[in-house]
Amino acid sequence: MAEQAWTQSWKAPRDHPAETTEVLYLKYHGYRRRQAARLLHVMPREAVRELYGEAREWAQGRGLHDVQDPMATLVRFAEHLLPLPPFEVWLADREQYPLCHIEDSNEGPHAAKVGQPGRLEDRHFNYAGRSWVASLHVFRDGTIWRGFLRFRQRGSTGRYHTANIFLEETAREVQRRFREFDRATLGAFLRSVLP
C-alpha cells in the first residue's frame, strides 16, 4: 500500500519520460534479484545446498516453488532473507546517488544501454542570456561506457543532444570528465546542436 501511494505521487523527471511506475518497479525488482544472486555467489557451495533445502520448503509452503528452475526458488528465498530496502527508500536513494545505481545495474534487461541511457547529473549554466541545463546521459556499450549531453532551456520543452562524446572504462570516469567542462565548453557543445 505504501509503495502504491509513493508511486502515485511520483512524477518522472523531464529527461526520463519512459520511466513509468511499471518500469521503476521492474528496475527495483531487478535490484532485489541482483542482491540475492550476489549473496549466493559469495556463499560456500555446501551452504548453498543447505540453503536450497530451506528455500524449497519455504517456496512450497507459499506455492512459489519452480520445479523447472530451482535457482529461481533459491534467489526468491535469498531475497526474502536479505534486509533489502522498500521501494520508496530505494527510489529516494536512486535519485540521490544515480551513479551507484547505474553502475549496479549494468547487467540485466534494465541496464543503462544504447537504447536506454541513464541520466547521471545536471549542470546549470547561462548561454546567450538564457538559463540552460546540461544533463549527462551514460550507457554501457560492451566493456566501455559512452556518454552524451542533452540540453534544455529552462521553461522550454525543446531538447537538444550531442552525439556520444564520452568514451571511458567506467561511468565514474565519464562523470569526472563531464565535471571538468567549464561554462565555455558547455556553451560550445550547446552551440553545436542548436538548429
Image (tube, helix red, strand yellow):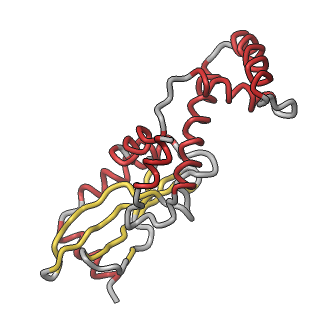
Residue depicted at x 37% and y 77%: 159
Report the number of numbered marks. Answer: 0
Name the quadrant containing residue 183.
bottom left
Depth check: 95 or 168 in front? 95
Residue depicted at x 61% and y 28%: 79
Percent from the top left, x then y, of residue 150? 36, 70
Depth check: 191 or 61 in front? 61
Examine the rendered structure and indicate whether residue 2 appears above or below residue 52: below
Percent from the top left, x then y, of residue 87? 48, 40
Name the quadrant containing residue 131.
bottom left
Image-based side of 90 in relation to 26, left or right: left
Image-based side of 149 in relation to 68, left or right: left
Percent from the top left, x then y, of residue 144? 51, 52
Percent from the top left, x then y, of residue 101? 45, 44
Image-based side of 125 in relation to 164, left or right: left
Examine the rendered structure and indicate whether residue 103 appears above or below residue 150: above
Q: Residue furthest right?
A: 68
Residue depicted at x 44% and y 68%: 164
Image-based side of 183 in relation to 100, left or right: left
Depth check: 21 or 78 in front? 21
Name the quadrant containing residue 8.
bottom left
Examine the rendered structure and indicate whether residue 2 appears above or below residue 187: above
Q: Residue furthest bottom?
A: 195
Q: Residue furthest left?
A: 129
Q: Quadrant where the C terminus lies?
A: bottom left
Depth check: 195 or 80 in front? 80
Examine the rendered structure and indicate whether residue 190 appears above or below residue 40: below
